[in-house]
Image: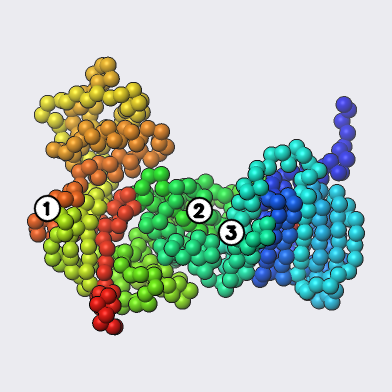
Amino acid sequence: MPIRVLDPKVVSRIAAGEVVERPASVVKELVENSLDASSSQISIEARGGGVGLIRVTDNGIGIPSTEVELAFDRYATSKIGSLDDLESIPSLGFRGEALPSIAAVAEVDIVTCAVDESVGTYISLKDGVIADRGSQGRSQGTTITVRNLLRKVPARLKFLKSTATENGHIANVVTQYALAFPEVKFTLLIDGRETLRTSGNGQLVDSVIEVYGIDVVKNMLEIKDKGWESGVVSPQVTGVISSPAVSRSGRDYLSFFVNRRWINSRLLAWAVEEAYRGLLMSGRHPIAIINISLPAKEVDINIHPTKTEVKFGNERTIFSTVQKAVRRALIELMPVPKIEEVATTYVPPSPPRQSLWTSTEVSAASPAVSSETPAVALLILRVMGQLSNSYIIAEGPDGLYLIDQHAAHERILFEKIRYQSSQHQIEVQGLLEPATFEVNPKEEEALKLHYEDLAEFGFSIEPFGDRTYLVRAVPALLQNKDWAGTVRELLASLLGRDKSDWWETIAISIACHSAVRAGQALTDDEMRELIRQLEQTSIPNTCPHGRPTIIHISTGQLRKEFGRGF
Ligand code: ADP
Ligand code: MG
Protein backbone atom coordinates (compact mmCIF):
# COMPACT_ATOMS: atom_id res chain seq x y z
CA MET A 1 0.00 0.00 0.00
CA PRO A 2 1.36 3.46 -0.78
CA ILE A 3 1.75 5.89 2.09
CA ARG A 4 -1.43 7.85 2.67
CA VAL A 5 -2.63 10.23 5.35
CA LEU A 6 -5.30 8.47 7.37
CA ASP A 7 -8.91 9.54 7.24
CA PRO A 8 -9.64 11.84 10.24
CA LYS A 9 -12.25 9.38 11.50
CA VAL A 10 -9.66 6.62 11.70
CA VAL A 11 -7.19 8.96 13.36
CA SER A 12 -9.65 9.96 16.03
CA ARG A 13 -10.54 6.39 16.80
CA ILE A 14 -6.88 5.43 17.17
CA ALA A 15 -6.30 8.42 19.41
CA ALA A 16 -9.42 7.60 21.42
CA GLY A 17 -7.88 4.26 22.25
CA GLU A 18 -5.17 6.01 24.22
CA VAL A 19 -7.63 7.80 26.44
CA VAL A 20 -10.56 5.40 26.60
CA GLU A 21 -9.10 2.13 27.71
CA ARG A 22 -12.25 1.00 29.47
CA PRO A 23 -15.47 2.53 30.81
CA ALA A 24 -13.76 3.63 34.00
CA SER A 25 -11.45 5.85 31.90
CA VAL A 26 -14.49 7.75 30.67
CA VAL A 27 -15.71 8.20 34.23
CA LYS A 28 -12.26 9.44 35.22
CA GLU A 29 -12.10 12.02 32.43
CA LEU A 30 -15.61 13.30 33.04
CA VAL A 31 -15.12 13.53 36.80
CA GLU A 32 -11.83 15.37 36.27
CA ASN A 33 -13.61 17.83 34.01
CA SER A 34 -16.28 18.38 36.66
CA LEU A 35 -13.62 18.99 39.29
CA ASP A 36 -11.77 21.40 37.01
CA ALA A 37 -15.08 23.23 36.61
CA SER A 38 -15.12 23.94 40.39
CA SER A 39 -18.14 21.76 41.05
CA SER A 40 -19.21 21.16 44.62
CA GLN A 41 -21.53 18.31 43.68
CA ILE A 42 -20.84 15.54 41.21
CA SER A 43 -23.13 12.60 40.60
CA ILE A 44 -22.08 9.64 38.54
CA GLU A 45 -24.36 7.00 37.14
CA ALA A 46 -23.30 3.83 35.32
CA ARG A 47 -25.27 1.01 33.78
CA GLY A 48 -24.17 -2.27 32.27
CA GLY A 49 -20.57 -1.92 33.43
CA GLY A 50 -20.49 1.55 31.88
CA VAL A 51 -20.96 0.24 28.35
CA GLY A 52 -24.71 0.81 28.44
CA LEU A 53 -24.57 4.24 30.01
CA ILE A 54 -22.33 6.62 31.90
CA ARG A 55 -23.75 9.91 33.08
CA VAL A 56 -21.88 12.56 35.02
CA THR A 57 -23.75 15.58 36.33
CA ASP A 58 -22.13 18.52 38.04
CA ASN A 59 -22.94 21.99 39.29
CA GLY A 60 -19.74 23.57 37.99
CA ILE A 61 -19.14 26.62 35.85
CA GLY A 62 -20.63 25.06 32.70
CA ILE A 63 -19.60 25.70 29.11
CA PRO A 64 -20.79 28.88 27.36
CA SER A 65 -23.21 28.04 24.52
CA THR A 66 -20.78 29.43 21.95
CA GLU A 67 -18.05 27.00 23.03
CA VAL A 68 -19.90 23.72 23.49
CA GLU A 69 -19.14 22.43 20.00
CA LEU A 70 -15.53 23.48 20.30
CA ALA A 71 -15.14 21.41 23.46
CA PHE A 72 -15.50 18.33 21.24
CA ASP A 73 -12.72 19.38 18.89
CA ARG A 74 -9.41 17.65 19.37
CA TYR A 75 -6.88 19.63 21.40
CA ALA A 76 -9.50 22.18 22.33
CA THR A 77 -9.09 23.18 25.95
CA SER A 78 -9.83 26.14 28.17
CA LYS A 79 -7.16 25.09 30.63
CA ILE A 80 -3.82 25.96 29.06
CA GLY A 81 -2.99 28.53 26.45
CA SER A 82 0.70 28.30 25.70
CA LEU A 83 3.76 26.12 25.86
CA ASP A 84 4.80 27.83 29.08
CA ASP A 85 1.57 26.74 30.74
CA LEU A 86 2.59 23.14 30.18
CA GLU A 87 5.37 23.64 32.68
CA SER A 88 2.98 24.07 35.56
CA ILE A 89 -0.50 22.74 35.14
CA PRO A 90 -2.87 23.50 37.98
CA SER A 91 -5.91 21.70 36.50
CA LEU A 92 -6.52 17.98 36.14
CA GLY A 93 -7.17 18.18 32.41
CA PHE A 94 -5.11 20.05 29.84
CA ARG A 95 -4.79 17.94 26.73
CA GLY A 96 -8.19 18.71 25.23
CA GLU A 97 -8.50 15.11 24.20
CA ALA A 98 -11.10 13.56 26.46
CA LEU A 99 -14.37 14.78 25.01
CA PRO A 100 -13.43 14.19 21.34
CA SER A 101 -11.99 10.78 22.22
CA ILE A 102 -15.14 9.72 24.04
CA ALA A 103 -17.32 11.05 21.23
CA ALA A 104 -15.30 9.00 18.73
CA VAL A 105 -16.24 5.73 20.40
CA ALA A 106 -19.71 6.36 21.85
CA GLU A 107 -22.90 8.35 21.52
CA VAL A 108 -22.63 11.47 23.62
CA ASP A 109 -25.23 13.97 24.83
CA ILE A 110 -24.30 17.11 26.69
CA VAL A 111 -26.52 19.61 28.44
CA THR A 112 -24.67 22.53 29.93
CA CYS A 113 -25.45 25.93 31.31
CA ALA A 114 -22.69 28.43 32.02
CA VAL A 115 -22.53 30.92 34.84
CA ASP A 116 -24.36 33.88 33.36
CA GLU A 117 -26.65 32.11 30.96
CA SER A 118 -30.38 31.82 31.45
CA VAL A 119 -30.87 28.75 29.35
CA GLY A 120 -28.71 25.74 28.73
CA THR A 121 -27.31 24.27 25.53
CA TYR A 122 -27.97 20.77 24.34
CA ILE A 123 -25.80 18.88 21.85
CA SER A 124 -25.98 15.29 20.73
CA LEU A 125 -23.08 13.60 18.89
CA LYS A 126 -22.95 10.37 16.95
CA ASP A 127 -19.66 9.04 15.56
CA GLY A 128 -18.01 12.21 16.76
CA VAL A 129 -20.27 14.38 14.63
CA ILE A 130 -23.01 16.67 15.88
CA ALA A 131 -26.38 15.06 15.22
CA ASP A 132 -28.63 17.42 17.09
CA ARG A 133 -28.43 20.75 18.84
CA GLY A 134 -30.80 22.98 20.79
CA SER A 135 -31.56 24.85 23.97
CA GLN A 136 -32.64 23.18 27.14
CA GLY A 137 -33.45 24.46 30.57
CA ARG A 138 -31.13 23.47 33.37
CA SER A 139 -29.43 25.05 36.33
CA GLN A 140 -25.78 25.98 36.16
CA GLY A 141 -23.54 23.02 35.48
CA THR A 142 -23.03 20.22 33.01
CA THR A 143 -24.49 16.79 32.36
CA ILE A 144 -22.71 14.48 29.96
CA THR A 145 -24.31 11.18 28.99
CA VAL A 146 -22.29 8.52 27.20
CA ARG A 147 -24.13 5.58 25.65
CA ASN A 148 -23.08 2.44 23.81
CA LEU A 149 -19.45 2.93 24.64
CA LEU A 150 -17.06 1.02 22.37
CA ARG A 151 -20.00 -0.73 20.68
CA LYS A 152 -18.56 0.30 17.33
CA VAL A 153 -15.07 -0.83 18.30
CA PRO A 154 -15.64 -4.56 18.80
CA ALA A 155 -11.92 -5.29 18.96
CA ARG A 156 -11.68 -3.24 22.11
CA LEU A 157 -15.05 -4.17 23.54
CA LYS A 158 -13.93 -7.76 23.49
CA PHE A 159 -11.18 -6.96 25.95
CA LEU A 160 -13.49 -5.62 28.60
CA LYS A 161 -14.02 -7.83 31.60
CA SER A 162 -17.29 -8.82 33.24
CA THR A 163 -19.85 -6.15 34.08
CA ALA A 164 -19.00 -6.62 37.75
CA THR A 165 -15.29 -6.03 37.10
CA GLU A 166 -15.91 -2.92 35.01
CA ASN A 167 -18.30 -1.65 37.70
CA GLY A 168 -15.54 -2.24 40.21
CA HIS A 169 -13.13 -0.09 38.19
CA ILE A 170 -15.70 2.66 37.95
CA ALA A 171 -16.36 2.56 41.68
CA ASN A 172 -12.64 2.71 42.31
CA VAL A 173 -12.14 5.85 40.20
CA VAL A 174 -14.98 7.64 41.95
CA THR A 175 -13.77 6.49 45.35
CA GLN A 176 -10.29 7.84 44.72
CA TYR A 177 -11.58 11.25 43.74
CA ALA A 178 -14.01 11.27 46.66
CA LEU A 179 -11.01 10.77 48.93
CA ALA A 180 -8.95 13.42 47.19
CA PHE A 181 -11.75 16.00 47.23
CA PRO A 182 -13.60 15.73 50.54
CA GLU A 183 -15.10 19.18 49.93
CA VAL A 184 -17.04 17.83 46.94
CA LYS A 185 -20.23 15.88 47.40
CA PHE A 186 -20.04 12.71 45.34
CA THR A 187 -22.80 10.24 44.62
CA LEU A 188 -22.36 7.09 42.62
CA LEU A 189 -25.23 5.02 41.26
CA ILE A 190 -24.37 1.69 39.69
CA ASP A 191 -27.25 -0.03 37.91
CA GLY A 192 -29.66 2.05 39.95
CA ARG A 193 -28.06 1.23 43.28
CA GLU A 194 -26.37 3.93 45.32
CA THR A 195 -22.90 2.64 46.04
CA LEU A 196 -21.23 5.75 47.39
CA ARG A 197 -22.33 9.06 48.83
CA THR A 198 -20.01 11.52 50.50
CA SER A 199 -21.07 14.55 52.46
CA GLY A 200 -18.77 17.04 50.79
CA ASN A 201 -18.19 18.73 54.16
CA GLY A 202 -14.46 18.96 53.57
CA GLN A 203 -13.48 16.50 56.31
CA LEU A 204 -11.29 13.75 54.93
CA VAL A 205 -12.25 11.60 57.89
CA ASP A 206 -15.88 11.61 56.79
CA SER A 207 -14.98 10.57 53.26
CA VAL A 208 -12.83 7.78 54.67
CA ILE A 209 -15.79 6.58 56.75
CA GLU A 210 -17.96 6.48 53.64
CA VAL A 211 -15.36 4.60 51.67
CA TYR A 212 -13.79 2.25 54.20
CA GLY A 213 -16.21 2.23 57.13
CA ILE A 214 -16.02 3.43 60.69
CA ASP A 215 -14.00 0.51 62.00
CA VAL A 216 -11.15 1.35 59.70
CA VAL A 217 -11.33 5.02 60.51
CA LYS A 218 -10.85 4.39 64.19
CA ASN A 219 -7.49 2.93 63.33
CA MET A 220 -6.27 5.58 60.95
CA LEU A 221 -3.44 7.93 61.80
CA GLU A 222 -2.93 11.33 60.34
CA ILE A 223 0.20 12.33 58.51
CA LYS A 224 1.01 15.90 59.08
CA ASP A 225 4.20 16.75 57.39
CA LYS A 226 5.64 19.77 59.06
CA GLY A 227 8.69 20.05 56.94
CA TRP A 228 10.37 18.36 59.87
CA GLU A 229 13.44 17.48 57.98
CA SER A 230 15.66 20.52 58.21
CA GLY A 231 12.94 22.93 57.26
CA VAL A 232 12.10 21.28 53.96
CA VAL A 233 8.74 22.63 52.88
CA SER A 234 8.40 20.85 49.59
CA PRO A 235 7.26 18.24 48.83
CA GLN A 236 4.59 18.26 51.48
CA VAL A 237 3.01 14.99 52.46
CA THR A 238 -0.46 14.83 54.00
CA GLY A 239 -3.11 12.20 54.39
CA VAL A 240 -4.07 9.28 56.56
CA ILE A 241 -2.61 5.83 57.03
CA SER A 242 -3.74 2.74 58.88
CA SER A 243 -2.20 1.86 62.19
CA PRO A 244 -0.72 -1.65 62.17
CA ALA A 245 -3.92 -2.85 63.83
CA VAL A 246 -5.63 -2.93 60.44
CA SER A 247 -4.14 -4.24 57.26
CA ARG A 248 -5.16 -5.76 53.98
CA SER A 249 -3.94 -8.68 51.96
CA GLY A 250 -3.52 -6.62 48.77
CA ARG A 251 -2.02 -3.31 47.74
CA ASP A 252 -5.31 -1.95 46.40
CA TYR A 253 -5.81 0.23 49.42
CA LEU A 254 -2.94 2.56 48.71
CA SER A 255 -4.20 5.78 47.14
CA PHE A 256 -1.78 8.39 45.94
CA PHE A 257 -2.40 11.89 44.71
CA VAL A 258 -0.01 14.48 43.45
CA ASN A 259 -1.44 17.93 43.86
CA ARG A 260 -4.72 16.05 44.24
CA ARG A 261 -4.40 14.27 40.92
CA TRP A 262 -4.93 10.54 41.39
CA ILE A 263 -1.88 8.68 40.18
CA ASN A 264 -0.41 5.20 40.13
CA SER A 265 3.05 5.06 41.55
CA ARG A 266 5.14 2.07 42.43
CA LEU A 267 7.72 4.40 43.89
CA LEU A 268 5.23 5.77 46.42
CA ALA A 269 3.77 2.34 47.20
CA TRP A 270 7.26 1.16 47.95
CA ALA A 271 8.01 4.17 50.14
CA VAL A 272 4.89 3.51 52.22
CA GLU A 273 5.55 -0.18 52.59
CA GLU A 274 9.10 0.58 53.65
CA ALA A 275 7.77 2.74 56.44
CA TYR A 276 5.74 -0.20 57.79
CA ARG A 277 8.74 -2.50 57.97
CA GLY A 278 8.56 -4.57 61.13
CA LEU A 279 5.03 -3.43 61.89
CA LEU A 280 2.94 -5.65 59.65
CA MET A 281 2.88 -9.37 59.24
CA SER A 282 4.47 -10.28 55.95
CA GLY A 283 1.97 -10.53 53.16
CA ARG A 284 -0.13 -7.80 54.78
CA HIS A 285 -0.39 -4.27 53.40
CA PRO A 286 -1.48 -0.96 54.87
CA ILE A 287 -4.30 1.34 53.90
CA ALA A 288 -3.04 4.78 52.94
CA ILE A 289 -4.44 7.90 51.37
CA ILE A 290 -1.59 10.23 50.65
CA ASN A 291 -1.37 13.51 48.84
CA ILE A 292 1.90 15.06 47.85
CA SER A 293 1.88 18.78 47.25
CA LEU A 294 4.71 20.27 45.32
CA PRO A 295 5.21 23.04 42.82
CA ALA A 296 3.64 21.93 39.53
CA LYS A 297 6.92 22.41 37.73
CA GLU A 298 8.59 19.71 39.85
CA VAL A 299 6.41 16.98 38.43
CA ASP A 300 5.67 16.06 34.86
CA ILE A 301 2.13 14.81 34.36
CA ASN A 302 2.29 14.94 30.62
CA ILE A 303 3.88 11.58 30.02
CA HIS A 304 0.81 9.53 29.19
CA PRO A 305 -2.59 10.35 27.69
CA THR A 306 -4.42 8.97 30.73
CA LYS A 307 -2.37 11.23 32.99
CA THR A 308 -2.18 8.54 35.68
CA GLU A 309 1.58 8.24 35.56
CA VAL A 310 3.81 11.06 36.61
CA LYS A 311 7.50 11.72 36.60
CA PHE A 312 9.01 13.41 39.62
CA GLY A 313 11.90 15.76 39.16
CA ASN A 314 13.62 14.32 42.19
CA GLU A 315 12.47 10.79 42.90
CA ARG A 316 14.84 10.22 45.75
CA THR A 317 13.58 13.20 47.73
CA ILE A 318 9.99 12.17 47.13
CA PHE A 319 10.69 8.63 48.26
CA SER A 320 12.44 9.55 51.43
CA THR A 321 10.01 12.33 52.35
CA VAL A 322 7.03 10.01 52.01
CA GLN A 323 8.71 7.17 53.82
CA LYS A 324 9.78 9.35 56.71
CA ALA A 325 6.45 11.13 57.02
CA VAL A 326 4.62 7.80 57.19
CA ARG A 327 7.11 6.30 59.59
CA ARG A 328 6.93 9.29 61.86
CA ALA A 329 3.14 9.18 61.94
CA LEU A 330 3.30 5.50 62.83
CA ILE A 331 5.76 5.97 65.62
CA GLU A 332 4.35 9.11 67.14
CA LEU A 333 0.70 8.54 66.84
CA MET A 334 0.24 4.89 67.36
CA PRO A 335 -2.29 4.47 70.11
CA VAL A 336 -1.95 2.26 73.09
CA PRO A 337 -5.07 0.17 72.45
CA LYS A 338 -7.84 1.06 74.82
CA ILE A 339 -10.71 -1.06 75.91
CA GLU A 340 -13.48 1.36 75.18
CA GLU A 341 -16.58 0.55 73.29
CA VAL A 342 -17.16 2.54 70.19
CA ALA A 343 -20.20 4.09 71.76
CA THR A 344 -18.44 5.57 74.71
CA THR A 345 -18.22 9.30 74.93
CA TYR A 346 -15.54 9.31 77.56
CA VAL A 347 -12.38 10.97 76.41
CA PRO A 348 -9.48 10.40 78.77
CA PRO A 349 -7.76 13.52 80.01
CA SER A 350 -4.70 14.08 77.82
CA PRO A 351 -3.95 10.51 76.89
CA PRO A 352 -0.31 9.66 76.33
CA ARG A 353 -0.87 8.78 72.70
CA GLN A 354 -3.99 8.79 70.70
CA SER A 355 -4.87 7.82 67.22
CA LEU A 356 -6.56 10.40 65.13
CA TRP A 357 -10.04 9.14 65.62
CA THR A 358 -10.41 6.96 68.65
CA SER A 359 -13.97 7.69 69.64
CA THR A 360 -17.27 8.00 67.87
CA GLU A 361 -16.92 11.72 67.89
CA VAL A 362 -15.21 11.14 64.66
CA SER A 363 -16.41 14.18 62.84
CA ALA A 364 -15.78 16.40 65.80
CA ALA A 365 -12.24 15.18 66.13
CA SER A 366 -10.44 17.63 63.96
CA PRO A 367 -7.19 16.45 62.48
CA ALA A 368 -5.37 18.70 64.91
CA VAL A 369 -6.36 16.52 67.84
CA SER A 370 -3.51 14.18 68.02
CA SER A 371 -0.52 15.35 66.18
CA GLU A 372 0.29 18.05 68.68
CA THR A 373 0.43 15.49 71.46
CA PRO A 374 4.11 14.91 72.00
CA ALA A 375 5.28 11.35 71.64
CA VAL A 376 5.88 9.99 75.10
CA ALA A 377 7.60 6.74 75.78
CA LEU A 378 5.55 4.20 77.69
CA LEU A 379 4.30 5.42 80.98
CA ILE A 380 6.10 4.38 84.09
CA LEU A 381 4.29 1.18 84.91
CA ARG A 382 4.18 -0.59 88.28
CA VAL A 383 4.07 -4.34 87.95
CA MET A 384 1.28 -5.89 90.00
CA GLY A 385 1.46 -9.51 88.91
CA GLN A 386 1.17 -12.06 86.16
CA LEU A 387 -2.04 -13.48 84.74
CA SER A 388 -2.23 -17.00 83.30
CA ASN A 389 1.57 -16.98 83.19
CA SER A 390 1.11 -14.97 79.98
CA TYR A 391 0.14 -11.39 80.73
CA ILE A 392 1.78 -8.86 82.95
CA ILE A 393 -0.67 -6.78 84.96
CA ALA A 394 0.56 -3.27 85.64
CA GLU A 395 -0.73 -0.03 87.03
CA GLY A 396 0.01 3.29 85.37
CA PRO A 397 -1.00 6.92 85.86
CA ASP A 398 -4.24 6.38 83.98
CA GLY A 399 -5.48 2.94 84.93
CA LEU A 400 -4.66 -0.62 84.21
CA TYR A 401 -2.26 -2.01 81.61
CA LEU A 402 -2.09 -5.61 80.43
CA ILE A 403 1.05 -6.59 78.61
CA ASP A 404 1.35 -9.68 76.48
CA GLN A 405 4.74 -10.98 77.61
CA HIS A 406 5.50 -12.89 74.42
CA ALA A 407 4.48 -10.07 72.06
CA ALA A 408 6.37 -7.51 74.16
CA HIS A 409 9.51 -9.61 74.21
CA GLU A 410 9.24 -10.19 70.45
CA ARG A 411 9.24 -6.44 69.92
CA ILE A 412 12.28 -6.00 72.14
CA LEU A 413 14.23 -8.76 70.42
CA PHE A 414 13.23 -7.67 66.94
CA GLU A 415 14.65 -4.22 67.56
CA LYS A 416 17.76 -5.71 69.12
CA ILE A 417 18.30 -7.83 66.01
CA ARG A 418 17.67 -4.84 63.79
CA TYR A 419 20.23 -2.82 65.70
CA GLN A 420 22.84 -5.56 65.69
CA SER A 421 22.26 -6.17 62.02
CA SER A 422 22.67 -2.50 61.17
CA GLN A 423 25.99 -2.54 63.05
CA HIS A 424 26.97 -5.86 61.44
CA GLN A 425 27.32 -7.24 64.94
CA ILE A 426 24.87 -10.08 65.14
CA GLU A 427 25.81 -12.22 68.13
CA VAL A 428 26.63 -15.71 67.05
CA GLN A 429 26.75 -18.89 69.13
CA GLY A 430 28.98 -21.68 67.89
CA LEU A 431 27.56 -25.14 68.57
CA LEU A 432 29.68 -27.43 70.77
CA GLU A 433 29.40 -30.06 68.11
CA PRO A 434 28.27 -29.34 64.56
CA ALA A 435 24.77 -30.68 64.09
CA THR A 436 23.43 -32.33 60.96
CA PHE A 437 20.28 -31.00 59.44
CA GLU A 438 18.29 -32.81 56.78
CA VAL A 439 16.04 -30.98 54.39
CA ASN A 440 13.44 -32.01 51.85
CA PRO A 441 13.81 -30.87 48.22
CA LYS A 442 11.63 -27.82 48.71
CA GLU A 443 13.50 -26.73 51.81
CA GLU A 444 16.74 -27.27 49.98
CA GLU A 445 15.60 -24.96 47.21
CA ALA A 446 14.89 -22.22 49.75
CA LEU A 447 18.13 -22.89 51.56
CA LYS A 448 20.18 -22.50 48.41
CA LEU A 449 18.47 -19.20 47.69
CA HIS A 450 18.90 -17.83 51.18
CA TYR A 451 22.22 -19.25 52.29
CA GLU A 452 23.88 -15.89 52.62
CA ASP A 453 20.85 -14.21 54.06
CA LEU A 454 20.78 -16.75 56.87
CA ALA A 455 24.51 -16.40 57.35
CA GLU A 456 24.04 -12.70 57.89
CA PHE A 457 21.92 -13.54 60.92
CA GLY A 458 24.46 -15.93 62.37
CA PHE A 459 23.48 -19.27 60.90
CA SER A 460 26.52 -21.13 59.66
CA ILE A 461 25.14 -23.89 57.47
CA GLU A 462 27.19 -25.85 54.98
CA PRO A 463 26.37 -28.69 52.57
CA PHE A 464 27.21 -32.17 53.79
CA GLY A 465 25.90 -34.09 50.80
CA ASP A 466 22.63 -35.81 50.00
CA ARG A 467 20.27 -33.11 51.23
CA THR A 468 22.10 -33.05 54.53
CA TYR A 469 23.68 -29.93 55.94
CA LEU A 470 26.03 -29.22 58.75
CA VAL A 471 25.16 -26.44 61.16
CA ARG A 472 28.12 -25.01 63.02
CA ALA A 473 26.70 -21.85 64.54
CA VAL A 474 23.32 -20.22 65.18
CA PRO A 475 22.24 -16.72 66.25
CA ALA A 476 23.06 -16.33 69.95
CA LEU A 477 19.43 -15.51 70.66
CA LEU A 478 18.45 -19.02 69.64
CA GLN A 479 20.92 -20.67 71.96
CA ASN A 480 19.12 -23.44 73.87
CA LYS A 481 16.06 -22.81 71.75
CA ASP A 482 14.64 -24.87 68.95
CA TRP A 483 16.86 -23.40 66.25
CA ALA A 484 16.23 -26.35 63.92
CA GLY A 485 12.48 -25.73 64.08
CA THR A 486 13.12 -22.05 63.43
CA VAL A 487 15.20 -22.79 60.35
CA ARG A 488 12.60 -25.22 59.04
CA GLU A 489 9.81 -22.71 59.52
CA LEU A 490 11.93 -20.03 57.91
CA LEU A 491 12.68 -22.12 54.86
CA ALA A 492 8.98 -22.80 54.42
CA SER A 493 8.05 -19.15 54.69
CA LEU A 494 10.94 -17.85 52.60
CA LEU A 495 10.02 -20.08 49.71
CA GLY A 496 7.98 -18.31 47.10
CA ARG A 497 8.33 -15.06 48.97
CA ASP A 498 9.39 -11.84 47.37
CA LYS A 499 13.17 -11.87 47.75
CA SER A 500 13.06 -8.36 49.16
CA ASP A 501 11.18 -9.51 52.26
CA TRP A 502 13.80 -11.90 53.49
CA TRP A 503 15.42 -9.66 56.06
CA GLU A 504 12.23 -8.98 57.88
CA THR A 505 11.03 -12.56 57.65
CA ILE A 506 14.20 -13.88 59.23
CA ALA A 507 14.41 -11.19 61.90
CA ILE A 508 10.79 -11.69 62.94
CA SER A 509 11.15 -15.43 63.04
CA ILE A 510 14.25 -15.32 65.22
CA ALA A 511 12.58 -12.81 67.54
CA CYS A 512 9.49 -14.97 67.76
CA HIS A 513 11.35 -18.19 68.51
CA SER A 514 13.67 -16.71 71.07
CA ALA A 515 11.07 -14.66 72.94
CA VAL A 516 9.65 -15.75 76.26
CA ARG A 517 6.59 -17.94 75.67
CA ALA A 518 3.07 -17.55 76.90
CA GLY A 519 2.59 -19.88 79.83
CA GLN A 520 6.03 -19.19 81.27
CA ALA A 521 6.13 -17.95 84.85
CA LEU A 522 8.16 -14.77 85.31
CA THR A 523 9.59 -13.28 88.48
CA ASP A 524 8.75 -9.69 89.44
CA ASP A 525 12.26 -8.65 88.45
CA GLU A 526 11.93 -10.29 85.06
CA MET A 527 8.62 -8.56 84.44
CA ARG A 528 10.01 -5.19 85.47
CA GLU A 529 12.99 -5.68 83.19
CA LEU A 530 10.73 -6.64 80.30
CA ILE A 531 8.69 -3.46 80.69
CA ARG A 532 11.81 -1.37 81.04
CA GLN A 533 13.17 -2.77 77.80
CA LEU A 534 9.84 -2.39 76.06
CA GLU A 535 9.91 1.29 76.97
CA GLN A 536 13.20 1.62 75.11
CA THR A 537 11.84 0.30 71.84
CA SER A 538 10.82 2.66 69.08
CA ILE A 539 7.37 1.15 68.75
CA PRO A 540 6.36 -0.37 72.04
CA ASN A 541 2.72 -0.82 71.17
CA THR A 542 2.89 -3.66 68.69
CA CYS A 543 4.89 -6.78 68.16
CA PRO A 544 6.72 -7.14 64.83
CA HIS A 545 3.76 -9.08 63.48
CA GLY A 546 1.61 -6.04 64.10
CA ARG A 547 -0.33 -7.45 67.02
CA PRO A 548 -0.76 -5.29 70.14
CA THR A 549 1.63 -5.71 73.03
CA ILE A 550 -0.33 -3.60 75.50
CA ILE A 551 -3.97 -3.12 76.33
CA HIS A 552 -4.98 -0.14 78.42
CA ILE A 553 -8.11 0.16 80.55
CA SER A 554 -8.36 3.73 81.71
CA THR A 555 -9.55 4.70 85.17
CA GLY A 556 -12.42 6.49 83.45
CA GLN A 557 -13.42 3.29 81.76
CA LEU A 558 -13.21 1.42 85.07
CA ARG A 559 -15.38 4.06 86.77
CA LYS A 560 -17.87 3.71 84.01
CA GLU A 561 -17.91 -0.07 84.10
CA PHE A 562 -18.48 0.04 87.85
CA GLY A 563 -21.28 2.56 87.44
CA ARG A 564 -19.47 5.27 89.39
CA GLY A 565 -20.25 7.97 86.87
CA PHE A 566 -17.58 10.43 85.90
P1 ADP B 1 -9.35 19.14 28.86
O1 ADP B 1 -10.01 18.73 30.14
O2 ADP B 1 -8.03 18.50 28.71
O3 ADP B 1 -9.31 20.60 28.67
P2 ADP B 1 -11.59 17.88 27.58
O4 ADP B 1 -11.76 17.31 26.24
O5 ADP B 1 -11.77 16.96 28.74
O6 ADP B 1 -10.18 18.54 27.64
O7 ADP B 1 -12.58 19.08 27.74
C1 ADP B 1 -12.54 20.14 26.81
C2 ADP B 1 -13.03 21.42 27.43
O8 ADP B 1 -14.43 21.32 27.67
C3 ADP B 1 -12.42 21.75 28.76
O9 ADP B 1 -11.20 22.45 28.61
C4 ADP B 1 -13.50 22.63 29.38
O10 ADP B 1 -13.38 23.94 28.96
C5 ADP B 1 -14.77 22.06 28.81
N1 ADP B 1 -15.47 21.16 29.73
C6 ADP B 1 -15.50 19.81 29.66
N2 ADP B 1 -16.25 19.30 30.67
C7 ADP B 1 -16.69 20.33 31.39
C8 ADP B 1 -17.52 20.45 32.58
N3 ADP B 1 -18.02 19.38 33.21
N4 ADP B 1 -17.78 21.69 33.03
C9 ADP B 1 -17.27 22.78 32.40
N5 ADP B 1 -16.48 22.72 31.32
C10 ADP B 1 -16.19 21.53 30.80
MG1 MG C 1 -10.64 16.82 30.58
Which of the marked residues, 2 or 1, is nearer the chain's N terminus?
Answer: 2
Q: Position of residue 318 (x, y in %)?
A: 49, 53
Q: Which residue is mark 1?
A: 521
Look at the numbered discs 3 and 1 and tell me whether their residues touch, using CB distance below 8 Å.
no
Q: Which residue is mark 3?
A: 175
Could you tell me which secondary element the residue under label 2 belongs to?
Answer: loop
Which residue is located at x 28 percent, y 77 percent?
560
Seen in the image, is 525 located left or right of residue 75?
left
Q: Position of residue 35 (x, y in %)?
A: 67, 64
* Depicted 398 relative to depicted 214: above or below: below
Location of residue 109 (image quadrant): bottom right
Seen in the image, is 549 located left or right of residue 196?
left
Look at the numbered discs 2 and 1 and tell me whether their residues touch, using CB distance below 8 Å.
no
Q: Which residue is mark 2?
A: 253
Which residue is located at x 27 percent, y 32 percent?
488
Q: Nearer the viewer, residue 316 or 417?
A: 417
Label 3 CB less than 8 angstroms from ligand 2: no
Frontmost of labels 3 and 1 is 1
Residue 3 visible in the snapshot? yes
Could you tell me which secondary element the residue under label 1 belongs to?
Answer: loop
Residue 296 visible in the snapshot? no
Which residue is located at x 19 percent, y 36 percent?
482
Look at the numbered discs 2 and 3 and tell me whether their residues touch, using CB distance below 8 Å.
no
Q: Position of residue 39 (x, y in %)?
A: 68, 69
Location of residue 501 (image quadrant): top left
The amino acid marked with disc number 3 is Thr
Residues at marks 2 and 1, CA–CA distance in whole angstroms:
42 Å
